[in-house]
Amino acid sequence: MTGGRIVSVCLPHFAMERWQRAMERSGNPAPDDVAAVLATDGPHGPVIHATNRAARLAGVTEGARVVDVKPLCPDLRVEYADIAGDRAALDQLVLWMRRWCPWTVADGANGVILDVTGAAHLFGGEAALVVDIEAQLSLLGLTAQLAIAPTWGAAWGLARFGSVRAICGKGEVAQAMAPLPVSALRLDDDTLLLLRRLGLKTIGSLAKIPRLSLTRRFSRVALPSNPLMRLDQAMGKLAEPVSSVAALPPFRAIARLAEPIQDPTPYLPGLCEDLCEQLSAKGMGCRRLGLTVYRSDGEVSVVEVATSSPSRDAGHLHRLFDDKLEQINPGFGFDLITLQAGGVEPVAELQAGLEGDANEDLHLSQLVDRLTARFGARSVTQPVLRDSHMPERAEDWAQALHRNRDMQQVTMRKQAKPLAKIASVGAQNEQAAVLHFPQAQDGSPPQVSGLTTASMPPARADVSTVPPGSAVPVKERPIRLLDRPEEIRVLYAVPEGPPVQFTWRRQTHKMTRYQGPERIAPEWWQDAPGTRLRDYYKIEDQAGRRLWLYREGLHEDGRGGDPRWFVHGMFA
C-alpha cells in the first residue's frame, strides 16, 4: 500500500457544459427546457456523445443513435461535438488545477487526477480541499464528482460509483471498494460483460476469487482487459504513479516602473526585444502577443495582436501595436507593463543566402500581419484551394491570418494523394500545357505536386492509363471565373456540339473557333440527386473574346428537359 493521497475529479458533463458556455458567450444561450445533444459520426449514422439535463430527463442516453432517439424526443436539438476542442480545453484545465498541487494529469476524456500528497493541510485538510475544488469548478460552470484515496484506481472508482466527496483512508481501500460494481476497475466493455456472465458483479465478489484462477484466465491480456492487475492497482499492490505533464514555460517580459506613466509606448521596443531574446534562446516563435498594463488604481487593460506564422522578430512585433495603444485608458497612470507571448511554436533557423546576411525583404506573412493589425482579420483575405472537381468549388476565400496553416494542410494532402487518383474526364484533342514525367526506377506510376496557375487550379487529366515517360495534359482554366454562371440563349447546328450563336447580356455573339468539350460529372457525395453533368467549351467570338461556356445536361438524359447553356468565365 502506497502512502500517497490521490484526488480523482470526474466531469461527467464536460463536453455539454463547455458547449453551453460557448453558446452563452456568443449571445445565443441554449434554453434549459429544450433537449440538446452533441453527436459524433458513427458507422451507422450520428451517435450521441453528450446530453443536457432536459435530454436526460426525456430518456436520451449517450451512445445511442440519433435516429433511434428522435421518436422519443421529436424536438431534440442536435449539434456536432468538438472532440479536439474538448481535449484542448481539458489540457488547459489540467494546468489550471495546479493551484492545489504541482502534479496533475488528464484522466480520459472527462477527468483529472491530482497528487495532493503533503498538500492537503495547506487548504485546511482533505475535506476542505475537496469542497474548495468542487466550488471553484462550479464557478467555471462544470459539474464535478470528487474522491480522495491512496491510489489512482481507488480514487477513480469512488469518484464515479462511490458516495459524494468520498474520502478513503490508507487502510480502508478494500472495505470502500468492495460494494462498488466491477465497472469501477476501469475495464473494457468485453471484460465487464464476461465478468457479469460469471456472476462477478462487485469488486468484493471478484476479490474473493483465488488469484491463481484469475491469473490462468487473464495472464496474457492487456491492462484494460485484466481485472487482476486493475484490482492490484486499486489496492496499491501495483504502482500507478501520476506522471504530470510539464507546462510550457511562460515567455513574458516585464517592466516595473518607479512612478506611474501615461503612455507605455517608450517601453514597448525594449519589451519586444527582451521577449524575442527569450523565444530565440528556446528556438521558439509566437503567434499571439498580449500587452497588459496595470493602472495604479487597480484597473487592467489588455491589447492583443496576432501573426499569421510564428515570429520572433522584435521590429515586426513592435509594428503590430501601431495605432492600438490609443485604445488604452491611462486613468491615473501605469506602474507595471507586461508583454506575454501566446501560441508558442518551434521556429527553424533559415539562411536566405550563402553570405549568411539577414533577409531585408518584407515577407508576405509580415505584410499580412500589418494589414490585419490595421484593418482587422475579417478584412484581409486570400484565396485557398479546395479539393473539388467543380470549378466554383475549387477555390475559396479565407482569412489571410490563418491561410498559412490551411496551405500547409493542402500541401500535405497533395503529397499524400497520388495524382492517378485525381481523374477529370476531358476531350482527347484539347491543346494545353504538358508536364513530362520521367519513369521511376521501380516502375511505379509518376506523381505530381504543386500545380498552380494565375487564378485557379487547373483540372488535371486522368493519368491512370498514361504510359510512364509520356506527357500528361494540364487543362486550361479562365483567368476570371464568374461568381454565378450566367444563362445564355444559344443556336447550334447539332445538339451534341457547341453553339453557333448565343445571346449573352443582351448582345449576340457568333462563334468563330472552339475547343472542347471537357466533361465534368457532378460530385455525388455533396450534389443533390438528379444534378446534371456539364460539358465545357472554350470558344472565341467574332470580336476575339474568349469565353468559357458549358452545357448543363444532355438531350434525353432523363434528368429534366432540354439542356441549358451558361457562361462561366473569361480567358485572356
Image (cartoon, helix red, strand yellow):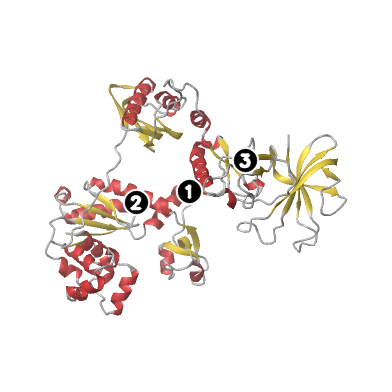
Element carrying mark 2: helix
Residue 537 visible at all: yes
Few, some or many residues within 10 Å of mark 1 (<14, 14–19, 20+) = few
Q: Could you tell me residue 486's position as x and y percent?
A: 75, 46
Residue at horizontal 50 percent and vertical 67 percent from the top: 44
Closer to the camera: disc 3 or disc 1?
A: 3
Give the left or right position of residue 97, taking residue 1 as reference.
right
Q: Is residue 345 depicted above or below 219 in this figure?
A: above
**Residue 90 tag number:** 2
Q: Are marks 3 and 1 in contact (CB under 8 Å)?
A: no
- Of labels 3 and 1, earlier in sequence is 1
Q: Could you tell me residue 52's position as x and y percent?
A: 41, 62
Q: Could you tell me residue 472's position as x and y percent?
A: 65, 44
Element carrying mark 3: strand
What residue is pinned by disc 1? 27
User: For residue 38, what is the image quadrant?
Assistant: bottom left
